[in-house]
Image (tube, grey):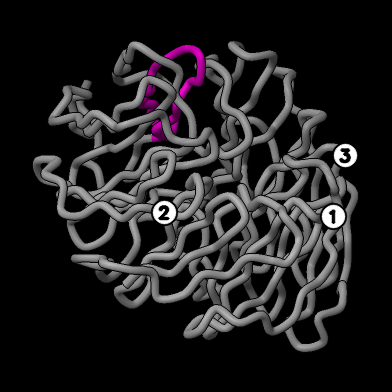
Amino acid sequence: MPHCPPGRRPPLSDASRSIFFGANAARTGHFEGTGPLAVKRARWKFAPRALVTTRNTPAIHDGVLFANYDNDRLYALDLAKGKELWSVRVGGASPESLSHPMVARGLLFVVGGGQCHAVDLGTHALRWSVSCDSEATSSPIVVDDVVYVGTRSGAVLAIDARTGTEQWRVQLRCGGSVQSAVSVTREQVIVGTCQGFTQGHVVALDRATGAERWSVETGSMSHGGAPAVHGDTVYALSGLGQRLHALDLDSGEQRWAYQTPGALWGAPAVADGVVCFTGYHSRLHAVDEETGKERWSVALDKPPASTASPTIAGGLVYMGARNAVHAWTLRDGTERWRWRAPYRVTTAPLIADGTLYVGCDRAVVALA
């Protein structure tokens, strides 16, 4: 079916100038600039004194890296040295009760303890908190001074970023819970839902009103995942459905689907006509964005963590799988380097100024 070529409608740029999970509001996982071309050792490693785990990709803003751990605290670290500057309690002591953080307009946004919080970067105090539900984990996104976030009870909220005032709250008709990170385009809010281990939908809502534009059954999308929007196509992983779906952004109509032999998780990364993704079956796939045909795939030593995803920068694909971080060429999947991590890699990498930042069990590391 003829359609606009990928890239004709570029990802919406958020106003934060920060670096966060998915790289941009559309969650394409494609970071500007280049990442490390070779790695021999970590530049720094930060681990809290308590034996706790991080499962969420950090955020970077103005020389500070923000990382949260399952001791319900979020830490602000000096980006150059990895030293703790300050920390704040953001609620939620269970292992999956925190979201990926992001920064915008002098505020740090994160979901924890069933609430969406805005932390003032100047005072380190909570500016406001809005109730989501008791086990909310959906990661917020901020565009044009509006925070968009989902809840496990199956709602999506739009919140004024400065005041915490709800602009709209919509209960999705398809049911299930919204555990995925929220993706945003110029006109739409895109989320993935989870109902049990196999059922789920991708849903598009009007940004201004929250009215449903379309809903497509694709399979479960859980915590750690996100739809990626590139050009006029939404790319969504279906968990135990074992498929990558390519959906028309305007209608939700399926353009193609790529079948795999195992469960898929995390979020796909899209750049230069290639979609990369992974899952439990211990492979990293790269498929053609237009046709859905495989370009290449590589075997991993062991399955990556369910909260790990690939990212793309400077023509390389970066991802952690168990106790290793890898870099492959986007063009043909040739491995450029592999670094042995001190613990299991548990997040998608961030790329900034030639350095890769990634979370592991009990530590965040910087590789350059």
Judging by the rendered image, the residue that carries numbered circle 3 is 133
In this orientation, does residue 333 appear? yes
Q: Give me the residue at 90% from left, 49% from top.
A: 131
Q: What x and y, as percent, mark residue 101? A: 65, 60
SS class of the residue under badge 2? loop
Judging by the rendered image, the residue that carries numbered circle 1 is 166
In space, the residues marked 3 and 2 are separated at their CA atoms by 35 Å
In space, the residues marked 3 and 1 are separated at their CA atoms by 15 Å
Task: Count residues near mark 1 (Cα–Cα under 10 Å), then give few for <14, some for 14-19, many for 20+.
Answer: some
Check if mark 3's residue and mark 1's residue have beta carbons within 8 Å: no
Task: Count residues near mark 2 (Cα–Cα under 10 Å), then give few for <14, some for 14-19, many for 20+.
Answer: many
The image quadrant of residue 353 is bottom left
Q: Give me the residue at 39% from left, 49% from top.
A: 28
Q: Nearer the viewer, residue 215 or 139?
A: 139
Q: Give me the residue at 52% from left, 85% from top.
A: 63
Q: Nearer the viewer, residue 189 or 327?
A: 327
Q: What x and y, as percent, mark residue 193? A: 64, 26
For the residue marked with disc 3, what is the amino acid? Asp
In space, the residues marked 2 and 1 are separated at their CA atoms by 42 Å
Q: Nearer the viewer, residue 33 or 302?
A: 302
Give the mark, 3 or 1, whose residue is nearer the N terminus. 3
Judging by the rendered image, the residue that carries numbered circle 2 is 341
In this rendering, the label closer to the viewer, 2 or 1: 2
- The magenta-colored residue range is 234-251
For the residue marked with disc 1, what is the amino acid? Glu
